[in-house]
Structures are given as structure tokens and as C-alpha cells.
């Protein structure tokens, strides 16, 4: 997959932007605060419908405007697609493919990207919600229908929590709780199975990518931590009983989920919240047999986060019918020493298209300084201008 042209209208600090992109490496260079990250953020949003920087879409609409538009021309082989998303301050966002309206969640069928940015350090050092979001975004890129499954699960979870809250004081009629429980189990078990399978696929790729970046094997490892098997639910899963690796059986997951809801019902009524399910799961990251969170150094954490993203790109390219995902490296090379810069450049050099941002041109290896685009105050500037 290649992005050949990008148009932005009222996105972040861009009033209007038109820029041609090339296959291979594209380097966006400019001082801090000029809009380099805004530009690549737009492409990340086009494929995932989310930003790596903010949770609200409104923050990406230029101040004083009611909407923003991201439009990209995509090419794979002989096929050309015009993909577009409009972010609105009021009303729902809209999407189009070749000028025909589609549901926004269907955009991932046409365009996939993997973006790495300094904020991704939170994948290693942050709380479980960031790792769950990372897994779910990758699931949707692989299997777009999972977007609807995840949305349905979140809706059922809200309804169930509302019922728990209303029943907490009166201990009233809970007959409908069984209905919501069964729906939660069906949807949640599908998410758990999909995430666990993805963890198993990512594991070898993460280990390989980490060794490539660092130049040595530190035993980078992933495993699933499932709240439905946890012995304690005071602060979510946190014991060895909840940690699983290798293939899971759907029947085991389904029965484990049902059993957890029965076992936890009194505690859930007291706390008015659902204590087991994929919304409380985690992915355990380990280096040399120790949890990366809390034990890994800054450099090790940075390398692990980068390895997670490179592994994601490897998984997507392996099964994609539309070519490689577009790989986006936002301000990555400034954090790496010269040897790791060279190893990373070698690792990404065979992707169909790589987009890189840098404040300092010399931070980026020469092999990745292909198509150079200079950004100043939300504008593309040429040597002539």
C-alpha cells in the first residue's frame, strides 16, 4: 500500500495542505511545533479512527472551524482508491471511498498504517488500558468486523454496569442480569480469543524485532493476563493464575467467563461494576524473565515499544491482500544511538512505504532520506520558496 497524495483541510495547524508522497522512505523535516507530527497523525487517524496523542477528535479540528478533512490517494498494484474522512464538531464523522459514502469503521478495509511515536513508551510503562487499546486497534486492522464486536461489548458492559448500580441499594429484581451476563460472555469471549491469538502471533515477531534493534537477545516475551481466571479482583488481574500463553479453547474461555461472573456477583453488586472480562485484561511484557514495566531501563522500554510496533507491521503485512501497511516513525531516531539507528533503518528499509519525521536531518540514516519534505508553520516549503 502506497499513499501517493495527501490533502488536509483545517486539520490541526493546516488550513490547506497538498503533498505528493513517494514509495519507499519519505522524510518530513522541520523544527519542533511546525506540524510534522500533525501531518502523520492524520494518516494514523485515517486507518485507525484514533489519534496517538489525544482522545477527542475535536482537538484535531483547526481552531475556529467546524470540521476537518483528511483525504488520501492510495495505490496498490493497479488499484487506486481515494479515501476520505471528515471530522465534525457537531454530528457524527463521515467517510467516503471514491466519493461514495461508507461507514467510518469500514475505512480500515482500505488503508492500514502502523505509527510509532514517543507516546508509545506508555505501552511498556503505562497502565493496561493503553495495551488493550493497542491490541484492539491491531485486531480491527486485521479483521474489520471486530470493530462492531468491540463496540457491542462496550455497549453491553455499560448496560450491565447501570443495572448493577441500580440494584446495589435495593437488592431488587436481578432477573435481567442473567440476560446481560450471557451477552457479555458471548461477545467478551470472542474478544479474549482474538486478543490471545494475536499475542501468540506477535510474540516471535516482538522477540525478533527487539533483538534486531538492540543487537542482542534480552528474552522479550508476551503473555495474556485474563481477569476471568484471576484469583483476586481488587485491582484487576495481577496473579499468576490469570497469566496464560499458548492457544486457548473457546469452551474454556466461555465457561471461565461464566464462572467468574457467578463467583463475583456479590462483589460486583457491592461495587456496582463488572470486575471480569476483556475490559480488565492486560498483556504482560517481559525482558529476561522480569516484567518490563518497572524493571526495564528507559532504553529497553523504548526498544520494546518500538519492537511491538514493528511486530504489528510484520503481522499485518503477512496476511494483507493490499500490500504492506504504511509504516510511520514519528520523531524516533532522536532517541536512538547511532548503532540502533542503523539497525532500525535496515529493519524498515524493505517496507513499501515509510514516513519519518525528524527535527534534525542528521538524526536520520542516509538510507531513509529519500523524498524530503520540509514543513514550516503548517506549510510545505521548497528550496525555491
Image (cartoon, rainbow, N blue to C red):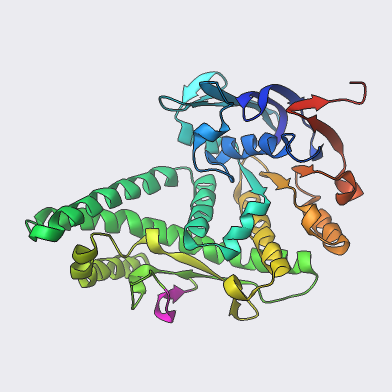
Q: Position of residue 325 (x, y in %)?
A: 66, 44
Can residue 312 be spotted in the picture? no
Q: Quadrant of the N terminus?
A: top right
Tell me: residue 22, above or below residue 151.
Answer: above
Tell me: residue 20, above or below residue 43.
Answer: above
- Is 108 contained in the magenta span? no
Tell me: residue 268, above or below residue 352.
Answer: below
Q: Quadrant of residue 191?
A: bottom left
- Is 243 contained in the magenta span? yes
* Residue for point 56% across, 28% down: 61
Left or right placement of residue 212 versus residue 103 in this view: right
Q: Position of residue 93 (x, y in %)?
A: 46, 28
Tell me: residue 219, above or below residue 144.
Answer: below
* Residue for point 87% across, 25% down: 382
Q: Quadrant of residue 326?
A: top right
Q: Quadrant of the C terminus?
A: top right
Q: Position of residue 346 (x, y in %)?
A: 83, 56
Left or right placement of residue 12 versus residue 194 in this view: right
Left or right placement of residue 209 versus residue 145 in this view: right
Left or right placement of residue 179 versus residue 137 in this view: left
Q: Which residues are magenta?
A: 238-244
Amino acid at each position: 500500500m502506497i499513499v501517493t497524495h495527501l490533502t488536509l483541510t483545517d486539520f490541526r495547524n493546516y488550513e490547506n495542505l497538498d503533498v505528493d508522497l513517494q514509495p519507499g522512505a519519505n522524510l518530513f523535516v522541520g523544527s519542533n511545533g511546525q506540524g510534522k507530527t500533525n501531518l502523520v497523525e492524520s494518516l494514523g487517524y485515517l486507518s485507525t479512527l484514533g489519534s496517538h496523542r489525544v482522545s477527542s477528535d475535536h482537538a484535531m479540528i483547526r481552531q475556529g472551524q467546524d470540521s476537518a478533512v483528511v483525504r488520501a490517494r492510495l495505490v496498490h498494484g493497479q488499484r487506486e482508491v481515494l479515501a476520505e474522512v471528515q471530522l465534525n464538531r457537531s454530528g457524527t464523522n463521515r467517510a467516503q471511498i471514491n466519493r461514495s459514502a461508507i461507514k467510518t469503521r469500514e475505512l480500515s478495509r482500505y488503508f492500514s498504517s502502523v505509527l510509532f511515536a514517543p507516546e508509545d513508551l506508555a505501552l511498556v510503562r503505562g497502565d493496561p488500558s493503553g495495551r488493550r487499546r493497542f491490541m484492539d486497534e491491531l485486531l480491527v486492522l486485521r479483521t474489520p468486523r471486530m470493530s462492531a464486536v468491540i463496540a457491542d461489548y462496550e455497549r453491553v458492559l455499560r448496560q450491565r454496569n447501570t443495572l448493577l448500580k441500580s440494584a446495589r441499594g435495593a437488592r431488587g429484581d436481578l432477573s435481567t442480569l442473567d440476560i446481560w451476563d450471557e451477552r457479555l460472555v458471548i461477545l467478551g469471549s470472542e474478544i479474549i480469543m482474538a486478543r490471545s491469538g494475536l499475542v501468540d502471533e506477535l510474540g516471535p515477531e516482538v522477540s525478533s524485532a527487539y533483538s534486531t534493534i538492540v543487537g542482542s537477545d534480552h528474552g522479550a516475551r508476551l503473555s495474556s493476563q485474563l481477569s476471568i481466571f484471576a484469583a483476586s479482583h481488587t485491582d484487576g488481574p495481577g496473579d499468576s493464575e490469570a497469566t496464560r500463553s499458548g492457544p486457548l479453547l473457546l469452551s474454556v474461555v466461555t465457561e471461565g467467563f461464566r464462572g467468574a461472573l457467578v463467583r463475583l456477583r456479590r462483589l460486583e453488586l457491592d461495587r456496582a461494576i463488572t470486575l471480569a472480562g476483556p475490559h480488565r485484561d492486560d498483556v504482560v511484557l517481559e525482558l529476561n524473565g522480569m516484567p518490563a514495566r518497572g524493571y526495564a531501563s528507559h532504553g529497553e522500554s523504548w526498544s520494546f515499544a518500538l519492537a511491538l510496533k514493528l511486530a504489528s507491521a510484520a503481522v499485518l503485512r503477512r496476511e494483507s491482500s493490499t500490500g504492506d501497511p504504511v509504516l510511520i516513525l514519528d520523531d524516533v531516531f532522536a532517541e536512538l544511538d547511532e548503532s540502533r539507528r542503523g539497525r532500525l533503518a535496515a529493519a524498515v528499509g524493505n517496507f513499501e512505504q515509510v514516513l519519518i519525521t525528524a527535527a534534525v536531518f542528521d538524526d536520520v540514516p542516509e538510507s531513509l532520506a529519500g523524498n524530503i519534505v520540509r514543513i514550516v508553520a503548517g506549510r510545505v516549503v521548497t528550496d525555491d520558496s
